[in-house]
Structure formats: C-alpha cells, structure tokens
Image (tube, rainbow, N blue to C red):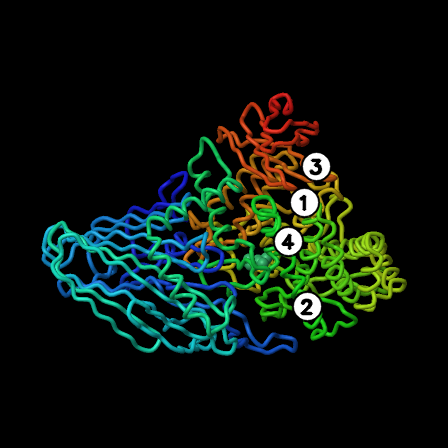
Amino acid sequence: MKDYIVADKWKIIENHFDPHLQMNSESLFSIGNGRMGQRANFEETYSGPSLRGSYIAGVYYPDKTRVGWWKNGYPEYFAKVLNSVNWIGIELKINGEIVDLYTCKVIDFKRELDMKSGLLKRSVTIKLKKDRVVEIRCERFYSMAQKDLCLMQYRVQPVNFNAKVNISWYLDTNVLNSDANYQEDFWKNRKQGIKKKKAWVMATTRKTGFTVCAAMRQELHTDNASEMVVSERMREGRIERAASTTVTQGGFISLKKYVSIASTFYHREEELVGVTTASAKTAMKDGFKKIRKAQARTWGDIWKRCDVEILGDVKAQQGIRFNIFQMIQTYTGDDPRLNIGPKGFTGEKYGGSTYWDTEAYCLPFYMSTTDPSVGRNLLIYRYNHLEKAIENASKLGFSGGAALYPMVTMNGEECHNEWEITFEEIHRNGAIAYAIHDYIRYTGDKEYLVDYGLEVLIAIARFWAQRVHVSPRKRKYVMHGVTGPNEYENNVNNNWYTNYIAAWCLQYAIAAARWVEERDPQKYTSLRSKINLDEESEFSHWNEIVEEMYYPVDESRGIFLQNDGFEDKEDLTVKDLDHAARPLNQNWSWDRILRSPFIKQADVLQGLYFFEEDFGIETIRRNFEYYEPKTVHESSLSPCVHSILAALIGNGEKAYEMYLRTARLDLDDYNNDTEDGCHITSMAGTWLSIVKGFAGMRVRDGVLHFKPFIPPAWEAYAFRISFRGQILRLVVGQEEVKVENLNDGPFSVVVFDECQNIEGNADATVRVSQQVA
Ligand code: BGC
C-alpha cells in the first residue's frame, strides 16, 4: 500500500517528488479523451525509471505469440495497443546543463490532476549547478470536445540568475512498446516535414498498416529575454524546433504546443497531413486559453451526468471521482469499433484489448451515466465480431454457427494464449449474452433483439449446446474442463457459475426468438434462413439441457458448489493465511495456488449477483458466508461484487469494507501493481458498489427501485442516473433519502418497496430510520 496522494475532493495531488514513485504516479495522473491518452510522463528528459506511453485507441499491432509449448487452437498473435507518437517531448538545457529531474536537485514539486476540468498540471523548482534555481510550470490536456487535439504549455523561470536557455520541442515516432514479445519495432517511419509554420510526422504500424500523423504549432513568449534564435531540425520519425535565448533573473520563457493527431482509423492516408496541420493551425488561432475553457466546460457537462458526491469523507470522494474520471476518459462510446481495455491508456499490460470486464462490469456504468448510444455501441462491438466468434469456435471444433467470443480481443480474434483460459474460461460467452439482457432491462430497447441481439444469442446458445454432454452416470448434462471466473482453479468439471449461465443463455435465446418472431415475423424468418436455424430440433435440445443441467450443490449446507470436488479441498479461510503470503500470486507457486481452497474472485457469487432474482436472500447469504471468507480478491474485479451482495444481505459493514478495497485500489496501490497502469475496468465496480450496492438500485419491470443504506462514516452521498431519457438525482443521508426528479414530466420510482410518484422538477423524501426499524 502507498499513502502519498493528498486527499482532495476534485484533484489528485502529489506534493513531493520521489523517483521510486514516478512509475506509479505516471499511471495515476494519466489523461485521455477516449480516442487517445497518455501516462503522466514528464515533458523534459527523464533518465530515471519510467514507462513512456502515449496510446491511440484502435491502433494496434499483432505481436507474435510467445508460449513455451504450443497447443493447437492458440492464436497466432496478441493484439496490442501501441505506444505511439511522443507529442509532449521537450529538451531543456540551462547554462549547458540538461534539466532531468532524476539527476538534478528537486526543491519543490507539485503534480495535480484536476478532474473537474480534465487538466494535468505540474510545478517544480530545481537547483542546478552553482545553486542556480529554476522554476518550471506546465500543463497539458487531451481535448474532450475535439478528439484529435492535445495541448500543452511549458514555462521556465530562472529565479536567482540570468539563464542561457536552450529549449527544443518535438514530435517523435521512434517509440517502442515496453510490452513486446520479440522486442520488435512496431512502427515504420514514413515521412516528416517542416515547411514554414507547418511541422508534422507520420508513421505506419507494421503488419496492420495503421498510419498515424501528428502535426504541431507553437507559440513562444518571453518577457525580458534577449533576442531569441529559433531553429528547426528533422530526422527520420522526428521533427523538432528549438529556441535559444538568455532569460534574465525573474523573467520567463513559455512555450505553448498545439498538437493534432489523426490516423487512418478515421481518415484516408492522403488526407492526414492536411487534416492535422489544419487542425493544429486552427487550435493555435483559437488559443490555449479558449480551448482550455472549452475543456472545463465539456468536463463540467460530463460531471453533470455522472458525478457521485460523498459528504463527510474526502478520501472516499476523491476515490469515486478518480474512478469515474478514468472511466470516462478511457471510453466515450462514440465509436462501436472501440472498447475498454483493463488498463485503458494508463499502461501496456493486457494490451489494451477487450475482456469480459466490459459486459460484466462496465456496461451498467455507461448506461446510467452517458448517452444511451454508448451502451448500445458496446453491444454492437460484439455484434460486429460475431463472425469472428463463430470462426473462433470452429477452430476449436464447434460447428453449425456456434460462437465462442474471445477471452481477449481487439478485432474479434482471440489473443489469449494460455489453454486453461483461452479454451476453458468460456463463461465469458455468457457475460456477452447477459449484457444484452441487462441492456434491454435498463433501457427498454427490446427492439435491439430484432436486428442484432437475437443473432448473437442464438450463436452463443449453439456453443453451449455443443459444449455440454450427458454424463452416463449422472444422467444429466454436465460441462467438463472449464475454468470459472476463479482463475485459481483450472480445468474443473461443472463449475456452477458456468453451468448456470449456460442454461440461462439457452433459455434466454429461446425466449428472445419467440419475442422477435411475434414482433417482426418477416425479419425472424429471414434471420432463420440466414443462420439455418432448425427451431424444432435445436430449441427442443436446448430446452432439454435447461431441464436436465447438472448443478453441484451441498444440500446440507444449502450452498452451490463452485465445482465438482470443491469441498474436498482443505477447509481453510483467508484468516488461516500468513499475512506474508499475500498476494498469493506473488508469493506462492502456481501449483500451490491451484490446489488451495483460496478463491481469486467472485465465482458462485458472480452468478448470484447476475441472477439475484432467481434466488432467495437466505440462499445468497449462505453462499456469501461460505465463499467470501475464502476469497483473496486478487482480481480487482472481485470486491465490488462482494460489496453489492453484502449490501443486499444487510451486511453493511462488509459492504463498506469491500467498497474501500475497490474505491482506492489504485490511489493507494493496494495490489502493488499500479505502476503497470490503473485497473480501469474494475473502476466501474466502485461505481456499482455505490449505486447497486449502497443505494440498492435495481430495475424491475421497467421501474427503478432503490433500497439505500449509508455507511456510518459518511454524512451523505448523492448521484445522478440517466434512465430511459430521464434524469434523477438520489441523495442519501443518515436520516432520509431524497429523490429529485430533474425532468419536466412526472417520474415514478420505488424506494424501500414504496412507489413514489414525483411531479416534474420536484422531489420526494423518505425517512431512513423508519425503514431500518
Ligand atoms: C481476471 C479476469 C479479468 C482480467 C482482466 C484477470 O486477473 O481474473 O477476470 O478479465 O484480469 O481484467
């Protein structure tokens, strides 16, 4: 754990420089705008440990697979979002001395991520040779309003001497990925140019052929400097401008850099130079101040929809806003080709690819806090990958249009290459079907089934129907050789969660087909013939599986068993573990982990979270009380599910404990791995813990329900929800719950099982104490 981030409601602040924390802070202070983003690297030279990273969504490289023993069915490559053009680069020399915070003396340092306005700021005072003191202030951002733009401002002030300043600023595509299987250079420099005020650089990814072009303009200001000599340089993959001058004591030189970055993801290659140079030029005309103002306005509008306020606990407030901020700047949802990598733009681990995290964790956040098209785009992403998912399943021996969605993907093809996950962690297919249900339940957009959803559901159902077999001994359908969400046990038989979600998918696919058939018989008929659906035999087979699926249970305890044989493991709980053994994945051999009864993340409980309505509270409680003590939460996706279920069964203390683990996971570096990047997808879990956990939000028959409780440490919390075109705000205090209807028309919600019909622009208040009693 680390504890150096200063508590603040709207800002992430570091007010002391420690090179050991630099990699960690580079992750935490990352900025982006959904299209591109970047770690908080320093602009100027830095020779200490650092992971330099600027990423562009959708621009990837197929890094050739590297495994020990090849298994048939492994993918050929892992698609990785690439480290791309370094647009912030500056070289600063003062009186011949290179400014490098790793080697010079840092007297004062403050780094600040202003989440309200989407700005990264830094101010630093350094002492150079002969006690020369220099102040540097910089600021940068990725424009949320104009997605190709990134701007920075860099100001140097000699405090106690007249400084000979050489400053150069550049764009450079000579960048490498730190995560590369064969240390290949993923980029091929194409061309660069400096012509009058225009300066640009262009590179193309090897193999995938994405071309990226970046153009810059700049403004230089000084107050009392002597004459300035400006020069320019160019070499392959790099264009650079430089200025040298003398800045007198107390004076300054400041640089404003306007950069536009575009790629063939959105433009034709021959347009790129024109598009980026024109955009950089317009940005400079508009000016830094104006664009920064627009940035604050855009973020202001975003916060109006998605903010969660917590009164009485600044650290908790900072935690939830940090998570929301990172989620929004990772994915803005305007392009169905993009998705949410577990590290977003904050690091290279997981390759920037898509996991089941999106459907299982992120979707509800975006549905409730952004435009309805955003959630839909997340579903369309998978619809567009359906053909690849069918191809993927057929590579593994499935047929007849069965689809297995990949564990990890960029373009629909599987990238993961560990057999126990690639081939066995198939529950992900269920999450993709579940997301369709979840989306329709929340938005009411059942029409989605007609053109997109049903086709996906049937292909997924076909997979499950082939993946099960009848056990001659049990005379039931069973599923062997799987890995559940708990990756600390592999190759198990009858993982309860997987069996359950498989049967659910089969049932849901049939129900969806019946609905589409009735709603739009013509489209249904044409889909049937497109996918050769033999309703009679396929549906009756699916129904039989649903009826005859085998579920491992312990009747005497009244719990579902994670998988066959789970109870034959040692009966230990996390309390029996030596503190020094945690996290297990960093301290124990893999073999020991696999044999142990310790659970990485919610597994049976993941199912109870998804399908809560199928089970009584007592069943959920018994399972929770059995599994939670065995869970080490070594996936960041785990605590939120536990927090939500704990709240559901009335264990407020546990719900809060689990919430704390998710809310400041990165800010306090709980898992000792934030330097690799932030846990973006699990950040949605923090929001879920508050909205679905503490506030108990559910949608039942098209109506929002709340059953709020408030942790004793908080005075109040409040959040906004967009629901079917309406916005409402819920304020939960220790004494009462207020629901504000922010729409002109009336709105009905259920609070503590009682329906509240609220007039437009009015509110309703319900006392909490009465409910608790
Ligand atoms: C978890 C998976 C998750 C992945 C990416 C793993 O540690 O076990 O469930 O999909 O991380 O977040």
Label 4, residues with CA under 10 Å away: few <14, some 14-19, many ≥20: many
Closer to the chain start, of discs 4 and 3, is 4
Q: Disc 4 to disc 3, how far (Cα)?
A: 20 Å
Dot 3: element: strand
Q: Pick the residue in front: 348 or 664.
A: 348
In the figure, 88 relative to 739: above or below?
below
In percent of width and height, residue 671 lies at: 47, 53
Label 3, residues with CA under 10 Å away: few <14, some 14-19, many ≥20: some
Dot 4: element: helix
Residue placed under numbered mark 1 in the picture: 442
Name the quadrant where ligand 1 sits.
bottom right
Nearer the observer: mark 2 or 3; the answer is 3
Residue placed under numbered mark 2 in the picture: 389
Closer to the chain start, of discs 2 and 1, is 2
* 721 sits to left or right of 8: right
Residue placed under numbered mark 3 in the picture: 703
Which residue occupies 78% across, 46% down?
Answer: 555
Residue placed under numbered mark 4 in the picture: 376
Label 1, residues with CA under 10 Å away: few <14, some 14-19, many ≥20: many
Q: Disc 3 to disc 1, how far (Cα)?
A: 9 Å
Q: Pick the residue in front: 490 or 292.
A: 292
Q: Amino acid at mark 1?
A: Tyr
In percent of width and height, residue 455 lies at: 75, 62
Q: Amino acid at mark 2?
A: Ala
